[in-house]
Amino acid sequence: MTKKRRKAIIRRRVFIATIASLLAAVVALIAVVVIAIKNAPDKKDESVKAGYVSSEDISSSKVEAPQEPEMFVTPTGVELDKNFGRLLLINGKNPLPDDYDTNVREYLVEIDEKYRNNNNVTQIHRDVYPYITAMVAAAQADGVDLRVWSPFRDYATQNILFQRQVERCGGDEQEAATVVARPGTSEHNTGLCADFNMADDAFEQTEMYTWMRENAEDYGFILRYPKEKEEITGVIYESWHWRFVGINNAKLINELGVTLEEFIQMKDYDPAIDMYGDDSASSMPEQIID
């Protein structure tokens, strides 16, 4: 074999060995990549662990959308149940029983003096107390001198007020009832509402009223007798009269722009379960479905 031919054979063997080495390296690299892909953590799982959930994840049955907390901590540090509500409907067409005035007494509590500006009527339903005092405290913390003027009134007190209004209306009881409810048909007889600061149209022009319009729903209160709803409520517009219905209820009522009468009708709700404040009152009726 010539020297020239021997060199050619060596070069060919080196080339083949180099190609084989490269192929082996490529195969090894592919194997490593495949193993890494198989062992890599699922990105969706990692995002859930990290607290990040995409809209695609929310629509998936594997991931549930975060639930809104049931408790609301007020700026003054009071914890309130957002799901608790009282929807008892009282008006001229839905009077209270004759014995309600007696039976409701065990559910009433005294409102602390720092939350009110009237010493004649000073009680509220115990279910409402933590919400109304938290609201007044929050307003006062904001520099707004909100105070409870007239909460619970018994039948006797309501009758005195009604008869005075009848006299002002020249003996017309029907007209009088649009301004002052007959005994047993007033929300004040339940202890679930209150007039704030003054029972006067001037309240609408105060900073207290402005604060209430912006914040009252956060504490479960609604403007019970709004403008242009007189035919539904049977009562004149009263900017000072606010009713406790519960936080989630209040927000939904305001969102829908309805009165309590309309809200209850839409829910097909039996307000009798809220008559005094039994355990059943703490259950929130399901949200309206149009």
Image (cartoon, rainbow, N blue to C red):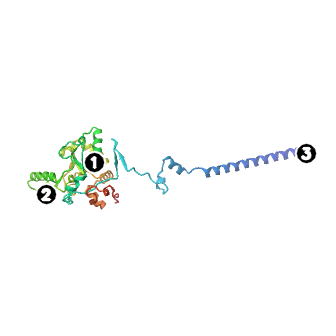
Q: Residues within 10 Å of mark 3 (few under 14, many from 20)?
A: few
Location of residue 159 in the rendering, given as x and y in whole percent from the top left corner: 14, 53
* Distance between the alpha carbons at the discs numbered 1 and 2: 33 Å
Residue 242 appearing in the image: no
Q: Which residue has dot 3 on it?
A: 2
Q: Which residue has dot 2 on it?
A: 174
- Mark nearer the N terminus (1 vs 3): 3
Q: Which residue has dot 1 on it?
A: 129
Which residue is outermost to the top?
A: 143
Position of 119 with respect to 32 (left or right) is left
Q: Amino acid at mark 2?
A: Gln
Residue at (82, 45) in percent of width and height: 11
- Mark nearer the N terminus (3 vs 2): 3
Asked where in the image residue 136 lies, by quadrant, the reply is: top left
Location of residue 249 in the rendering, given as x and y in whole percent from the top left corner: 31, 53
Q: Amino acid at mark 1?
A: Tyr
Position of 285 with respect to 109 (left or right) is right
Residue at (50, 50) in percent of width and height: 48
Q: Residues within 10 Å of mark 1 (few under 14, many from 20)?
A: many
Determine which of the numbered discs, if any, sits on residue 67 in the image: none
Q: Name the secondary structure under disc 3.
A: loop
* Distance between the alpha carbons at the discs numbered 3 and 2: 132 Å
* Distance between the alpha carbons at the discs numbered 1 and 3: 113 Å
Residue at (29, 38) in percent of width and height: 141
- Mark nearer the N terminus (1 vs 2): 1
Location of residue 26 in the rendering, given as x and y in whole percent from the top left corner: 70, 49
